[in-house]
């Protein structure tokens, strides 16, 4: 498997966590989202994803997947152990709900292309992004108060946690105060102690930059 | 089951299609997204979803689900027949990928709150939305050329089609030319001939309006 990604892309980061947690070997192909107008816009990459977005998981020369949620569900079905979804239907629904609050409720607003489009239109994206992130995290904190154990849904790691950790990192980058989310911060600490999260962290990636250009 | 939704919300529409296709009875609770500053912002609704978004599927007095993808995956696991996912792992991954291109790649940019926020900032959201919709539909058309049969993934209806049909409706509302997407238009026609799609269409809902205010 080859993963086309960017060290600081939260969608790429989710896939790295899942691959590491499931002990799956992969080759990382860094796609620099800023250099030369963005390598994701070059023909060689657009042949792999017309949307010019990372991550892309290439499973063979003949098929590849985009969209982090589709990739994680595929990895769960093809490599079920260790699991990233609970075994009961209600728990699985909860984990997917929390992950989707990040995936479709928050993250699309903070993606690079959206931010660039807003800046081109003369709008500072930061306050808008902070508002959406705050609303989404408040919803997750509220649900987690009744679903969380060690992790967001009970005592086992799920896709909900895989989506949470990169989202909290992105929230700090836009200057959001995270003190209103004590459950999320506790679970983030628990996750960060796991080897898979250490291996997948942006600071551990070969394409990391110490003083990166924004964003 | 009670579904809190709005006749023209594409996320609510997806859930209506799935419920109708699986022959599941439900009570519809209309939430008017525009009247009185939006009923989704009232305390009675926010107790059900702090994100102030439809759809919400209430399964009992003690648990409910938000996020259309989590709801559809739940319905698929709890009521597997007729299925909305293929039986093979690769087909399932393809259906989820195509659905997610709409769910997280396109739709969040056209949601009501995002558009209101942009207007408040003095930005006309229509060209921005058209750009994202065009990019997403081009990616789906490109993938569908190799995966489609009667429907987007092979010859059986899947969640990919459930996401496609409301998205094409929304694309027309922002004035996008759909002629570059012949595969998608053909599949839309096939879907619209199914009773579940007729029952779920906005024009068949009790809260529809003939001359609605925008959006």
Image: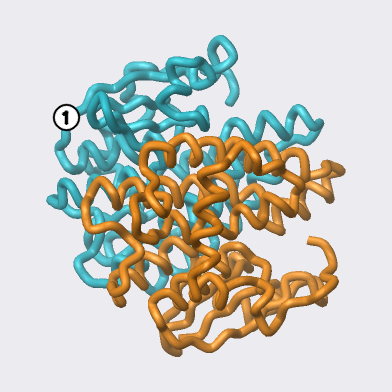
Chain colours: A orange, B cyan
Q: Where does residue B6 sit, x and y in percent of width and height?
A: 42, 25
Tell me: A5 left or right of A119. left
> In which quadrant is the C terminus of chain B drawn?
top right
Instruction: Please give the chain letter of the residue carrying mark 1.
Output: B
Examine the image and state in which quarter residue B182 appears: bottom left
Q: Residue at x 35, y 59 (%)?
A: A156
Across the whole image, how many numbered discs are drawn on residues? 1
Please provide percent x and percent y for residue A44.
64, 83
Rendering coords of residue A127 (x, y %):
77, 39
Task: Give neighbour class at mark 1: few <14, some 14-19, many 20+ (Cα, 10 Å).
Answer: few
| Residue A180, quarter of the rendered image | top right
Residue at image location 44% in from the left, 30% down from the top: B54
**Which image quadrant: the N terminus of chain B?**
top left
- The one of B134 and A3 positioned closer to us in this rendering: A3
Residue A3 spot, x, y in % from top left: 53, 80
Q: Nearer the viewer, residue A50 or A196?
A: A196
In-front residue for pair A89/B10: A89
Q: Is residue B211 visible?
A: no
Q: Which residue is mark 1?
A: B25
What residue is shown at x 38% (from left), y 59% (from top)?
Answer: A158
Disc 1 is placed on an element classified as loop
Q: Report the residue at 61% width, 40% height from top.
A: B175
Relative height, residue A200 to residue A150 (above, below): below
Q: Give the residue at the far top of this rendering.
A: B36
Using the rendered image of the protein, determine whether residue B53 is visible from the camera's viewpoint: yes
Of residue A128 and residue A117, the one placed in the foreground of this image is A128
């Amino acid at each position: 498997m080859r993963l086309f990604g960017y060290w600081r892309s939260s969608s790429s980061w989710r896939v790295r966590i899942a691959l590491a947690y499931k002990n799956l070997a992969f080759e990382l192909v860094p796609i620099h989202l800023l250099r030369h107008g963005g390598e994701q816009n070059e023909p060689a990459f657009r042949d792999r994803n017309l949307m010019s977005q990372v991550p892309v998981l290439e499973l063979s020369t003949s098929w590849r997947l985009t969209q982090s949620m589709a990739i994680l569900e595929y990895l769960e079905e093809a490599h079920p152990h260790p699991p990233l979804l609970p075994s009961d239907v209600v728990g699985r629904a909860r984990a997917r709900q929390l992950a989707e609050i990040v995936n479709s409720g928050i993250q699309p607003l903070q993606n690079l292309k959206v931010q660039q489009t807003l800046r081109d239109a003369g709008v500072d994206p930061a306050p808008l992004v902070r508002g959406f992130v705050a609303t989404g995290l408040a919803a997750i904190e509220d649900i987690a108060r009744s679903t969380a154990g060690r992790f967001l849904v009970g005592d086992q790691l799920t896709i909900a946690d895989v989506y949470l950790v990169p989202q909290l990192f992105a929230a700090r980058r836009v200057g959001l105060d995270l003190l209103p989310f004590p459950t999320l911060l506790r679970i983030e600490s628990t996750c960060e102690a796991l080897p898979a999260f250490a291996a997948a962290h942006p600071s551990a990636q070969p394409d990391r930059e110490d003083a990166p250009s924004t964003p």
